[in-house]
Image (spheres, grey):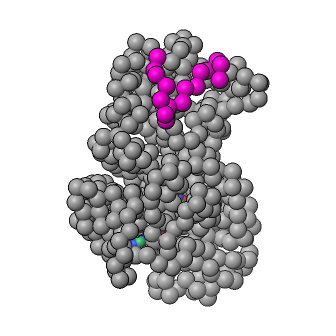
């Protein structure tokens, strides 16, 4: 069977990265298809921590409210000693929201619920993943890609994005190296219903890696996620009976009893980074490009933010931006993954100690940015911000006196020019919204002035993905015009 279907973007893999990219392309009106080899949506908890920066991304994509309604905060981590006494520690230290950072603590939401909410948003935008569609061959030329599925169907697309997970078919097909390390031993994860533990804490027993077992109450469900070193008999040991024996051995308690196992898996601990994110018209995103140990809750978050960086660039190039814009995707995202991988492995080393699951500010991903990128224009800076930094939020009021946050003005697929006690020097154009601080957003509490370090006459150009492209002044107008032309505006 060969049917020849044409689209602009083929996304292979409907996990968090593929779904996020699909939503971003859908709201931009880009033609795409989203395929997944699985017969139905994934049902396990896996990545359960949505970090503050990803919450901001999800706010922009219109899924934050249902995610917050479905999930909940992390409970304290309760570390038990051999005598059964315990100490409790908070998972995020000093995580207090501020006007510039509205989300300070990670949200706990099991991955299957995150994916469900992303699919619901995609359905609102009139799209859905196509399940039971496995990519098995890739051919490309300068114009596009022909993707062949296992059932013989061929899909022609101008771009292919491999968001197909750690074992990525796309990465293998492109012969892209995936260097890094595999840590010794194997870990397990199991979503279970159990009795004997309260849901007020994430219970951690045992300090030695091979003897550790933890029970995390999964927000939004009545399940506990059990994690630890895998049993000797691997996945065969992940039955209620097998887990109960392992729990007795590692906790010394017989009152913690697993009644049912809903999803379970044994996996290796890897830290690997693809050597390239792009070959011609094929790109990698998410776990296909980088895999992390689960400590620190970084893998899913880095995957979502890859997609968020790529979406607007693909849309711009498909419209009229020069193709080299796509090269900034690898240039910006690969160093971030390299840094995050260092963080995840460092947290893994710490997880072997009592200090284990404390996650500091770094894990929240709010300080990541694209300083030094060719998209960060070095025209000027303020005392607090320079090009490439994440654009902070700033709550104020609209002209009627109703509360209005800067993030509400940034929400959507457009670029934004913020003027501070200045007129815009740019001609109006599609895709660029001008927000006059003081007129459209009234900064009565001076949150904007404080976060942006703004002075009269400052202009702030903000990318669609919420990073500062430039801090400028009116006489920088020619440079701003040239920059916007280069991104297709
Ligand atoms: C125990 C555990 C705990 C974790 N905890 C966290 C956490 O707290 N926070 C965090 O950020 N991350 C965590 N992670 C990592 C997180 O689960 C992954 O980073 C995330 O799923 C990556 O998303 P993705 O969309 O890139 O890939 P995936 O979710 O792996 O999705 C890839 C999709 O591609 C499909 N596919 C594969 N091959 C093909 C093909 N040939 N054709 C078509 N479709 C294909 C697959 O069916 C799958 O649906 C954890 C992982 C584990 C295992």
Drawn side of residue 171 relative to residue 287, left or right: left
Q: Nearer the viewer, residue 358 or 57?
A: 57
Tell me residue 79's x, y (percent).
62, 61
Q: Nearer the viewer, residue 69 or 399?
A: 399
Question: What residue is drawn where x is 66% and y is 32%?
Answer: 405
Q: Nearer the viewer, residue 345 or 22?
A: 22
Q: Quadrant of residue 270?
A: bottom left
Drawn side of residue 174 relative to residue 410, left or right: left
Question: What residue is drawn where x is 51% and y is 79%?
Answer: 39
Question: What residue is drawn where x is 66% and y is 83%?
Answer: 260
| Figure check: 430 above or below 217 | above
Q: Quadrant of residue 284?
A: bottom left
Q: Nearer the viewer, residue 306 or 385?
A: 306
Q: Can I make out residue 142 in this image?
A: yes
Q: Quadrant of the C terminus?
A: top left
Is residue 41 magenta-colored?
A: no
Tell me residue 229's x, y (percent).
49, 73
Q: Can I make out residue 79 in this image?
A: no
Query: For the view shown, which residue lies furthest in the right direction?
Result: 401
| Figure check: 136 above or below 86 | below
Drawn side of residue 369 relative to residue 257, left or right: left
Is residue 436 magenta-colored?
A: yes
What predominant SS class does the magenta segment belong to? loop
Tell me residue 323's x, y (percent).
29, 44
Tell me residue 273's x, y (percent).
32, 57
Question: What residue is drawn where x is 35% and y is 21%?
Answer: 479
| Figure check: 26 above or below 263 | above
Magenta stretch bounds: 425-440
């Amino acid at each position: 069977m060969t049917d020849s279907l044409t689209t602009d973007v083929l996304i292979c893999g409907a996990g968090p990265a593929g779904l996020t990219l699909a939503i971003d392309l859908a709201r931009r009106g880009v033609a795409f298809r989203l395929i997944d080899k699985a017969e139905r949506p994934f049902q396990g908890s896996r990545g359960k921590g949505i970090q503050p920066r990803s919450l901001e991304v999800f706010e922009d994509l219109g899924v934050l409210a249902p995610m917050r309604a479905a999930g909940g905060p992390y409970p304290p981590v309760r570390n038990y000693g051999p005598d059964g006494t315990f100490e409790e520690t908070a998972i995020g230290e000093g995580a207090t929201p501020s006007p510039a950072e509205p989300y300070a603590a990670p949200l706990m939401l099991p991955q299957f619920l995150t994916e469900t909410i992303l699919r619901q948003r995609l359905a609102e935008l009139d799209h859905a993943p196509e399940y039971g569609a496995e990519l098995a061959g890739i051919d490309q030329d300068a114009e596009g890609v022909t993707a062949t599925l296992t059932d013989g169907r061929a899909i022609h697309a101008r771009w292919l994005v491999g968001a197909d997970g750690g074992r990525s078919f796309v990465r293998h097909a492109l012969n892209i190296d995936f260097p890094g390390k595999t840590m010794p031993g194997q870990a397990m994860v199991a979503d279970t219903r159990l009795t004997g533990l309260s849901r007020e804490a994430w219970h951690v027993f045992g300090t030695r890696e091979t003897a550790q077992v933890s029970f995390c109450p999964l927000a939004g469900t009545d399940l506990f996620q059990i994690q630890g070193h895998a049993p000797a008999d691997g996945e065969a040991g992940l039955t209620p009976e097998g887990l109960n024996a392992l729990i007795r051995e590692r906790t010394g308690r017989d009152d913690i009893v697993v009644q049912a196992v809903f999803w379970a898996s044994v996996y290796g601990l890897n830290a690997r980074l693809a050597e390239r994110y792009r070959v011609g018209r094929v790109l990698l995103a998410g776990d296909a490009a980088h895999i992390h140990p689960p400590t620190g809750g970084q893998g899913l978050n880095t995957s979502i933010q890859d997609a968020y960086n790529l979406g607007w660039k693909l849309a711009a190039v498909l419209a009229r931006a020069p193709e080299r814009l796509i090269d900034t995707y690898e240039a910006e995202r690969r160093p971030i993954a390299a840094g995050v991988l260092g963080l995840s492995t460092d947290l893994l080393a710490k997880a072997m100690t009592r200090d284990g699951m404390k996650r500091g500010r770094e894990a929240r991903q709010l300080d990541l940015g694209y300083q030094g990128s060719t998209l960060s224009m070095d025209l000027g800076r303020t005392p607090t911000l320079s090009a490439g930094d994440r654009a902070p939020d700033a709550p104020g009021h609209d002209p009627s006196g109703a509360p209005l946050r800067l993030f509400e003005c940034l929400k959507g697929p457009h670029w934004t020019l913020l003027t501070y006690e200045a007129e815009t020097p740019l001609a109006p154009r599609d895709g660029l919204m001008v927000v006059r601080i003081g007129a459209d957003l009234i900064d009565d509490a001076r949150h904007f002035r404080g976060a942006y370090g703004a002075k009269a006459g400052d202009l702030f150009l903000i990318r669609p993905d919420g990073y500062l492209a430039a801090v400028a002044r009116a006489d920088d107008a020619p440079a701003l015009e040239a920059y916007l032309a280069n991104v297709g505006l």
